[in-house]
Each structure stands twice: as structure tokens, then as C-alpha cells.
Image (cartoon, rainbow, N blue to C red):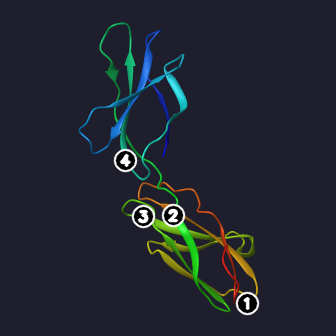
């Protein structure tokens, strides 16, 4: 729900002030602005917060000097990362496999990645667009942990879901 931005304004006059301007990339609505406290014409690591997950935004920097009209720089299109998937659970537990299911993150075109915990060397055990996966080749009686994240077409990845643990061949999840 945030974007981290860096920029440099070419040949900025002394005393100029800057604002970040942003709006939904597909919106014809008005720009929202955030005043910046910077001493020069470049800045790194400015964060726009409280944005919607998995949403594209048009972002620009505008310079104000004295009483003249603001000068807006070129627009950049950027997409926030999706929200983490929720509700990760084991739906089937067998002697050597576990079938997992989770609730989707909001938005279209998402893919999911499931990672195992230390018992599985933190390796990716699934990548795809389905909301279920089966992890096989497991050892009966061993406890395994799993986490899932969502990825959008812009390359953004969510945080991981909380870890869910389950004992292969019996026992509950948690």
C-alpha cells in the first residue's frame, strides 16, 4: 500500500519547493498532492503511503517557485504490491503429501508462490495462479511450515502470509 520514489529535477532554481502529485492511473480525477521537505532538486526514498494494494498510479513531481504556476514533470506509472493472501490452511494431509489452500488477494492477474520453512530449506514449493497446491515427497511424522505470497504482473510481491504448520501423516495445522 505504498510506493517508494526517487527523482532529480533538472536545473532547479534556489528556493524552489516540490510536491508529489498522484492519482489512479486510469482516473481522470484531480491530483492528490503531498508537500515535500527537501533542500535540493533531488531526493531519494520518498514514500507515498496509504495507497490501495495492487493498484496502478500516475505519479509526478511538481516544482513551485514564488507565485508562479507549478511546473509538473513527466508522469511515471507505478503499481503497488498486492495484499498478502490470507487463510492458508491444510485441506488434505496424507503420509507423504499435504494439500494447501488459501484465499486470494484482491485484483486481477495475480500469481502465488508458496515457500516451505526450514524443514524444506525455505524453498519455493509452488508457483502459479491457482489457490491450491499439493506438496509431495514429504516424510511421515515430520512437521512442515508454509507461507504464501502474491505477485502481480508489474513485478510487485506481497508480504508473506503468516506461517502455517502441519504434521505430515496426521496432526493439525496452526
Q: Mark 2 = which residue?
A: 85
Q: Residue at x 45, y 67 (%)?
A: 104
> Could you say whether the residue bearing mark 2 is in a helix, strand or loop?
loop
Q: Which mark is residue 110?
A: 3
Marked residue nearer the N-terminal end (4 or 3): 4
C-alpha span from label 3 to label 1 = 33 Å
**Picture quadrant where residue 71 is located:** top left
Category of crowding for the residue at label 1, using alpha-carbon neighbours closer than 10 angstroms: few (below 14), some (14–19), many (at least 20)? some
Decide if residue 10 is in sight here: no
Tell which tag, 3 or 1, sits nearer the viewer: 1
Q: Residue at x 67, y 73 (%)?
A: 174
Marked residue nearer the N-terminal end (3 or 2): 2
User: Is 51 in front, or is 42?
Assistant: 51
Q: Mark 1 = which residue?
A: 140
Tell which tag, 3 or 2, sits nearer the viewer: 2
Q: Mark 4 = which residue?
A: 56
Tell which tag, 1 or 4, sits nearer the viewer: 1
Horizontal placement of 142 versus 72: left or right? right
Amino acid at each position: 500500500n505504498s510506493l517508494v520514489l526517487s527523482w532529480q529535477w533538472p536545473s532547479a532554481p534556489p528556493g524552489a519547493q516540490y510536491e508529489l502529485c498522484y492519482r489512479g492511473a486510469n482516473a481522470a480525477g484531480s491530483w492528490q498532492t503531498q508537500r515535500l521537505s527537501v533542500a535540493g532538486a533531488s531526493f531519494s526514498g520518498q514514500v507515498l503511503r496509504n495507497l490501495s494494494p495492487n493498484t496502478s498510479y500516475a505519479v509526478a513531481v511538481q516544482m513551485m517557485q514564488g507565485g508562479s504556476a507549478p511546473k509538473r514533470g513527466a508522469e511515471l506509472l507505478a503499481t503497488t504490491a498486492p495484499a498478502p493472501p490470507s487463510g492458508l490452511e491444510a485441506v488434505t494431509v496424507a503420509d507423504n503429501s499435504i494439500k494447501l489452500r488459501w484465499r486470494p488477494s484482491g485484483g486481477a492477474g495475480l500469481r502465488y508462490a508458496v515457500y516451505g520453512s526450514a524443514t524444506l530449506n525455505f524453498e519455493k514449493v509452488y508457483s502459479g495462479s491457482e489457490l491450491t497446491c499439493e506438496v509431495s515427497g514429504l516424510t511421515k511424522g515430520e512437521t512442515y511450515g508454509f507461507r504464501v505470497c502474491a505477485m502481480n504482473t508489474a513485478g510487485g510481491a506481497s508480504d508473506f502470509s503468516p506461517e502455517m504448520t502441519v504434521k505430515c501423516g496426521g496432526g493439525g495445522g496452526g
